[in-house]
Amino acid sequence: MPLVRIDLRKGKDLTYRQEIARVVYEAMVAVAGVPANARFQVVSEHDADNFLFDPGYLGIDRSDDLVIIQITWNEGRTADQKKALYKAITDGLAKAPGIRPEDVFINLVDVRKENWSVGKGEAQYASWKDAYWEGTAGQRGGESTL
């Protein structure tokens, strides 16, 4: 189960923001084996004074339309899976809502399963067995990493 934070400058309408969240969620399900019902996203808008970035870092020409996406999720995905996710998100956002690939910044944070409590003050994933997820693999892409 990932927790997704999406940060951007103020001024985009609700549909634009919702489209970003949708694309990120659908890419995680399709490419990274995230369960179809594990959608936890926070979209935050910032004044220009509070949204700071280098517009030319590593030779990438960023604009004020930069979107920073941080996904915290369980460890266990391969570098190839992560690269496929970067591509799926970037390609999806280029189609809708029309964000340039140069303006998509993605950061993945891998954590151990015991670092989650999704309610009731319990560490749900620390006690669950991968066998549970094997029964639902067809619903979420076949991986057991959540």
Image (spheres, grey):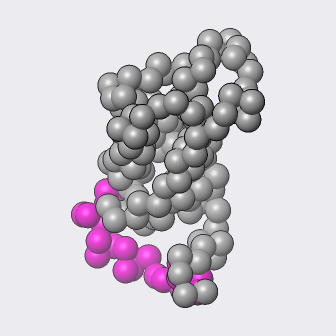
Residue 118 drawn in magenta: no
Q: Residue 48: horizontal and vertical position, in percent?
A: 68, 28
Residue 84 relative to residue 47: left or right: left
Q: Is residue 102 above or below residue 6?
A: above
Q: Residue 116: horizontal and vertical position, in percent?
A: 60, 73
Residue 56 relative to residue 23: left or right: right
Q: What secondary structure characterizes most of the magenta part?
A: helix
The magenta stretch spans which residues?
Answer: 122-142
Residue 137 relative to residue 103: left or right: left
Q: Is residue 63 visible to the viewer in this orientation of the structure?
A: yes
Q: Is residue 20 visible to the viewer in this orientation of the structure?
A: no
Q: Residue 33: horizontal and vertical position, in percent?
A: 39, 56
Tell me which residue sits at (55%, 19%) in the image: 102
Q: Quadrant of residue 127?
A: bottom right
**Viewer-proximal residue, 104 or 134?**
104
Residue 42 relative to residue 133: left or right: right
Tell me which residue sits at (49%, 55%) in the image: 41
Number of labelled discs?
0
**Viewer-proximal residue, 40 or 107?**
40
Tell me which residue sits at (29%, 71%) in the image: 136
Q: Residue furthest left?
A: 138
Tell me which residue sits at (59%, 56%) in the image: 72
Residue 138 drawn in magenta: yes
Q: Is residue 108 above or below residue 10?
A: below
Q: Is residue 119 above or below residue 54?
A: below
